Image (cartoon, grey):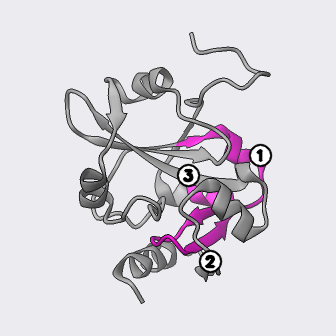
Amino acid sequence: MSKSLNRVRQALAAAGVDAALLEMDGETRTAEQAAGQAGCALDQIVKSIVFSGAESGQVRLFLTAGGNRVCPDRAALLAGETLARADAAQVRAQTGFAIGGVAPLGHVTAIPCWLDERLLAFDRVWAAAGTPRHIFAIAPHELQRIAGARPARFTLARPDEPAPA
């Protein structure tokens, strides 16, 4: 078992969550690939998007529904500074995972985390389990709890919601 996959398994067990880590037949690097492999709606996929603070260099994690995109202005308001996408080296150094397999938990360092409120509309969501081929299903409120994530509105507006102020 890979070190990354094992960290996710240990984090789930430490939180008292019994979730099966599933190896898929195909890749799950993108939300579309993961939804196809899991047989679920695109928005049931949890994307782990890592940003870096322009002033502090501190990384922040935004757990986003698969069909949503992070709004830089909304995310910056939550973080308290301008944000930019973290590069692959920074993502690996701070989370311990490679892009395409970043799990929402089991990171090698503590990272401030926010959860897209859209994910809370589902009974179950699917997240990366540390590799580009492994995912796990979890209740979104459980994910919120064990990831220490704060629910927030930080995505780009959909046609049925107002644009950020």
Mark 1–mark 2 Cα distance, whole angstroms, equals 20 Å
In the figure, 84 relative to 49: above or below? above
Amino acid at dot 2: Ala
Q: Residue furthest bottom?
A: 1
Tell me the residue that label 2 is attached to.
Answer: 19
Can you give x and y, in whole percent of width and height, for residue 47 in the image?
55, 51
Residue drawn at the location 30% of the way across and 43% of the way down: 59
Q: Nearer the viewer, mark 1 or mark 3?
A: 3
Q: Secondary structure at mark 2?
A: loop
Can you give x and y, in whole percent of width and height, for residue 143 in the image?
58, 58
Lateral position of residue 23 relative to residue 8, left or right: right
Can you give x and y, in whole percent of width and height, for residue 96 in the image?
31, 65
Mark closer to the chain start, 1 or 2: 2
Mark closer to the chain start, 1 or 3: 3
Look at the image and give the residue range highlighted in magenta.
115-144
Tell me the residue that label 3 is attached to.
Answer: 47
Of the 4 image quadrants, the one containing the N terminus is bottom left
Contact? badges 1 and 2 (CB < 8 Å)? no
Lateral position of residue 100 relative to residue 79, left or right: right
